[in-house]
Amino acid sequence: MLTSKGEYSFSTCWNIKRHTSGAEMIAEIQELGFQQVELNYNVTTEMLQTIEPMIERGLIGISSVHNTFPHTPDPDYGTDSVLLGFDDKVKRQKAIDLLVKSAEYAYRYGARAVVVHPGEVPFATNIDETLKGIYHEQGKDSPAYQQLWSEMIERRESLSEHYLQRIQHSLEEVCDRVLSKGYDVAFGIETRSRCYQMPTLSEAKKIRDRMQGAPVYLWYDIGHGMMMDRMGLYQNAEEANAMKDDIIGVHIHETLGLSDHWCPYIHSKDMTFFDRFLDIIDAAPVKVYELKAACQPQEIEDSHQLLISKIQERHRK
């Protein structure tokens, strides 16, 4: 076993595709030194049959679950969907019901938070994929990128308030139902990896301010924020640090160009850039590594040791 990771948690997204047994998946994460996990949205009810006894015996702690949980095969309620922002009342109600169910599991497992993808501004095609293709082939400053980006921003800004209100009303119903059941769990609306998805950091701040007193916070995905900054959507590090007190949890990973879920410091070989997020990580109540399968155990270990040594050095100053 590698060194104990203390309060840090680890998402099952790293190894879920390698396992059919939930217990074996958790055991592999424990070998990295983690005693807490985030159960992501691909965890099935079948996998939970072998994970739940481990939770009940105190063999593993659950920091958070990721909506929709357990896995929902219907793409209408997948992670890249309008979800809480659906205009269709029936679909939106089902999305609300699914989030309440995720919260029930979170409470039962002793998790502190539910990670939520709240929605998006819908586009007829995947404009994010097209933009990223132009970004890689011609660059962010190319006329083709700038033209399409302007079109995306115009539609996004014209419709964002409408969908923000839909999302807020859905979250209000979720909170009312969850609080009435006595479930002490927080909801973290997550920064996303596609430019048309919600929320931006400023949109998250609006929802948080409008829902003062409700258990709704920002879930700050660092790598996704880096990606959106590079594409031009918002000033990631500055805005996120200004919202430090609004954050319930973080997904810790680094982005190489527009490729996410890499080990901080190790894969970029940049020993300073990621430092701008250390204060956020240090302050976050829930700290979760969300890494891709390509990240190797020793790379994860080296990355974590660098990260915590840098945070400890800040404390000594």
Image: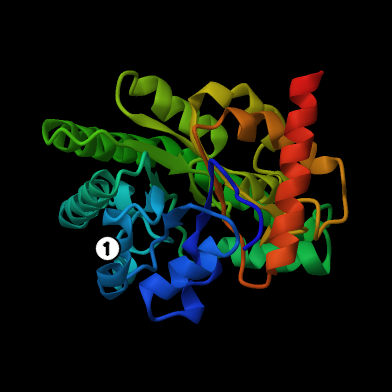
Q: Is residue 176 visible?
A: yes
Q: Is residue 221 left or right of residue 150?
A: left
Horizontal and vertical percent for residue 245? 53, 22
Q: Is residue 240 visible?
A: no
Tell me the colour scheme of the image: rainbow
Horizontal and vertical percent for residue 60? 40, 55
Kind of element beneath mark 1: helix
Residue 215 to residue 158: above or below? above
Residue 311 to residue 11: above or below? above
Residue 68 to residue 42: above or below? above
Q: Is residue 173 left or right of residue 258?
A: left
Q: Is residue 316 left or right of residue 225?
A: right
Identify residue for label 1: 53
Q: How many marks?
A: 1
Residue positioned 30% across, 73% down in the render: 73
Q: Is residue 123 left or right of residue 150?
A: left
Q: Amino acid at mark 1?
A: Pro
Residue positioned 47% across, 68% down in the render: 27
Residue 55 to residue 250: above or below? below
Q: Nearer the viewer, residue 62 or 104?
A: 62
Residue positioned 30% across, 71% down in the render: 50
Quarter occupied by the C terminus: top right
Residue positioned 37% across, 72% down in the render: 22
Quarter occupied by the N terminus: bottom right
Horizontal and vertical percent for residue 102? 27, 52
